[in-house]
Image (cartoon, helix red, strand yellow):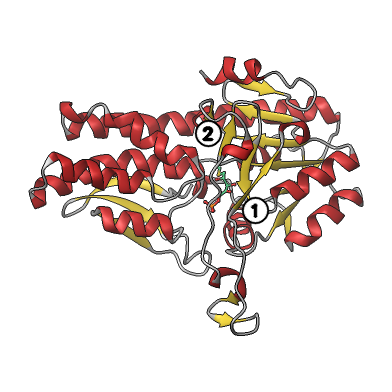
Amino acid sequence: MVLAIEWRDVDQPVIRLIDQTALPHQTRYLDVATVDDLVLAIGDLAVRGAPALGAAGALGVAMAMNQARREGWDDTRLQSEIQRIRDARPTAINLAWGVDRVRGAMPQGVHEVLRQAQALVAEDTAANRTLSRLGADWILARTGLDQVRVVTHCNTGALATTAWGTAYGIIHELHDRGRLGLVYADETRPLLQGARLTSWELQQDGIAHVVQADGAASSTILRGLVDVAIIGADRITANGDAANKIGSVALALACARAGIPFIVAAPTSTVDLSTKRGDDIVIEERASDEVVSFYGHRTAPEGVMGFNPAFDVTPHDLITAIVTERGVVEPATHPDPELLASIAR
Ligand code: MRU
């Protein structure tokens, strides 16, 4: 399985990223040893996906400590550079969470920070495996189907995590159990995480799928072509609202109309109990050019501005199930924030 992010000792210790801007046509790696390069890689989406960003945050603290030693930074400078990593993207809580998880170990030295960062990476992988089993169990029990047809949005596989994946992990689990029908992967405009990354992972894993335009998804659901929608999350608030890639809420609305489950799969590291509701989430707004151009070619008339929110929020009453490694909650039918809090604490 491909690793989106790992710590490597080459000539010097680096964070090795598979460059997700080049996939699927080129497999190239970035060895990142400076805060500038890490912040750039996060902003450009060379590394992306909430749990992978959590790993980038945690490993980034160790990397910044090494850079501080090389370049003679004082503690104030080091802390402000770490803050730049933490702030590199605003929506996925995992990035800040990853930084904060290891920051307290800084007085114990870089080896301890790195040990804790690597423990976080291992925990994420284990969480993905567990939530995938729980999610597959829940779907098979709820639908009673022999073969489950799935629609998914954006990319939630190994590339978006430390390994295996979240929503993608459930799809993979259903496949391994021989219970998966066709997968509809939304292309995910404007940066095509679905067409470029999810499709690549599905192909590598031998999983039957088609790529559809985002605009096709709600119709696919209303036509009865899928049995369940499974997506990931960048932040789940205390009341069960969930931010995910722009376009996700359209799937949720269509699923509610069609009466099929809409499932959000995420490790508990994505649950942010300190944010009360989805309206309080800062939604990243990305460059206009990503919308009004396509692969470097202008598509909209010159002078027109794009509107480019990278995420949307699905209200909890549209979410049939939130699947985490510590259990499943059903916000649409059991809208009790304490249920989510009890597994996320
Ligand atoms: O902008 P991206 O590609 O980082 O957005 C990623 C998503 O929206 C994913 O669905 C989410 O982070 C969950 S990844 C398991």
Residue at 73 percent of width and 24 percent of height: 330
Q: Amino acid at mark 1?
A: Ile
- Mark sitting on residue 290: none
Percent position of residue 147, x then y: 82, 39
Circle 1 is placed at which residue position? 246
| Of the pair 152 and 163, the residue shown nearer to us | 152
- Please determine whether, in this image, residue 55 is positioned above or below residue 139: below
Residue sitting farthest toward the left: 72
Residue at 90 percent of width and 49 percent of height: 222
Q: Secondary structure at mark 1?
A: loop
Q: Secondary structure at mark 2?
A: helix
- Mark sitting on residue 270: 2
- Please determine whether, in this image, residue 89 is positioned above or below residue 28: above
Mark 2 residue CB less than 8 A from any atom of ligand 1: yes
In terms of image quadrants, where is residue 267? top right
**Contact check, label 1 and label 2, Cβ < 8 Å:** no
Q: Is residue 212 visible?
A: no
- In-image side of 36 versus 316 (left or right): left
- In-image side of 277 versus 30 (left or right): right
Q: Amino acid at mark 2?
A: Thr
State how far apart marks 1 and 2 are (Cα): 17 Å
Residue sitting farthest toward the bottom: 302
Mark 1: few/some/many CA within 10 Å (<14, 14-19, 20+): many
Residue at 24 percent of width and 27 percent of height: 105
